[in-house]
Amino acid sequence: MADLTASFHDHTFQTPLMNASGVYCYTTEELDNLLASKAGTLVTKSATINYRAGNPEPRYRNLALGSINSMGLPNEGLAYYLDYVLKKQADPTVPTLFLSVAGISMAEDLDMLSTIDQSDFNGLTELNLSCPNVPGKPQVAYDFEATEKMLAAAFERFHKPLGVKLPPYFDLTQFDIVAQILNQYPLAYINTINSIGNGLYIDVDSETVAIKPKGGFGGLGGAYVLPTALANVHAFRQRLNPEIAIIGTGGIENGADVFAHLLAGADLVQVGTQLMKDGPDVFTRLAAELADIMNAKGYHKLADFKGKLKTL
């Protein structure tokens, strides 16, 4: 039978599946429900220093091929999520957890990283450089000079395992440039991709946009983004230092999509839109479907096929 155990640096997870930050991770109740599911681990909601209400509603809508959202980083503040992961890490039955931060400025990011560095948190921290839904705030990761400046400053003060959440890139030259930057630093991992920013869905019947913030512009998720997500996973696996792990995020609807992410080079796989639609029970289905594919192909463990995508 297929063994879904996933290795990630010095950590082992029962499955390679987890939530995408921003989905089903706002409250401690939601986080507890994730821990009770077939997810191998979880990541908290991307936190700012203080509570943030986010953008006006409606700010999320399910679509036939995925979703569109402009949430605007609603969260309870760093202390809320840091307190949660510190309490959970004292329980030996709880896997290593991921704590996500997304400051509104570089200074805020650095302040939060310092707070985490000085805490007893022994999990993995994720610095979100790719939130596309805060009005007036561009994505740091599309500014290569700012990205390098951010990472240099981060590693001056942060001494624990750190990963970065990246937006989708669309040009091979961009992959080359970003990988060259990332390879200069002792990153634990990258997470690719965040939603494809500033899509627009139009309801023809009502002749309106689908969400309220930013005049209807929002991040796309779900099946819309799967090919872009796979391209980013594979492109970075080809370019990054081997010790930098990859979390593949985007477009997961079924076990075949999970298999494709792993085949492209992902070590773990995050689920966003489908988790929003189905709730934490989605991980039971995805794990079973992944196991069925592995059994049909004669694969006993993830390492049998992970990162072994063939070209024509």
Image: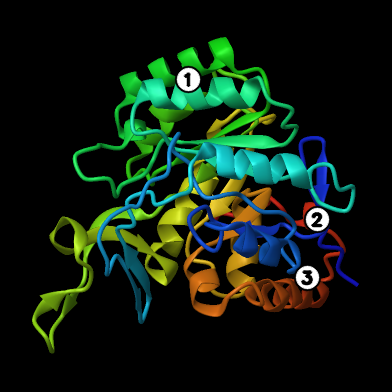
Residue depicted at 86% across the width and 48% down the height: 91
Residue with the most extreme bottom position: 205
- Whether residue 232 is visible here, answered yes or no, is yes
Residue 152's place in the image compared with 37, above or below, is: above
Q: In the rendered view, does 149 fall on the left or right side of 42? A: left
Picture disc at residue 304: 2
Residue at the (80%, 55%) spot, across then down: 304
Cα separation between marks 2 and 3: 9 Å
Question: 86 or 202: which is nearer to us?
Answer: 86
Under mark 3, the amino acid is: Met
Residue 110 position within the rendered picture, expressed as x and y whole percent measured from the top left: 47, 21
Which one is in front in this view, the residue at disc 1 or the one at disc 2?
A: 1
Pointer 2 or 3: first along the chain: 3
Residue that appears at 47% across and 13% down:
153
Identify the image quadrant of residue 223: bottom left
Which residue in the structure is indicated by mark 3?
294
Residue 74 location, x and y as percent?
39, 52
Asked whether the residues under the numbered discs 3 and 1 touch, taking CB atoms below 8 Å apart as contact, a structural biologist would say no
Which residue matches tag 1? 151
Q: Quadrant of the C terminus?
A: bottom right
SS for callout 3: helix
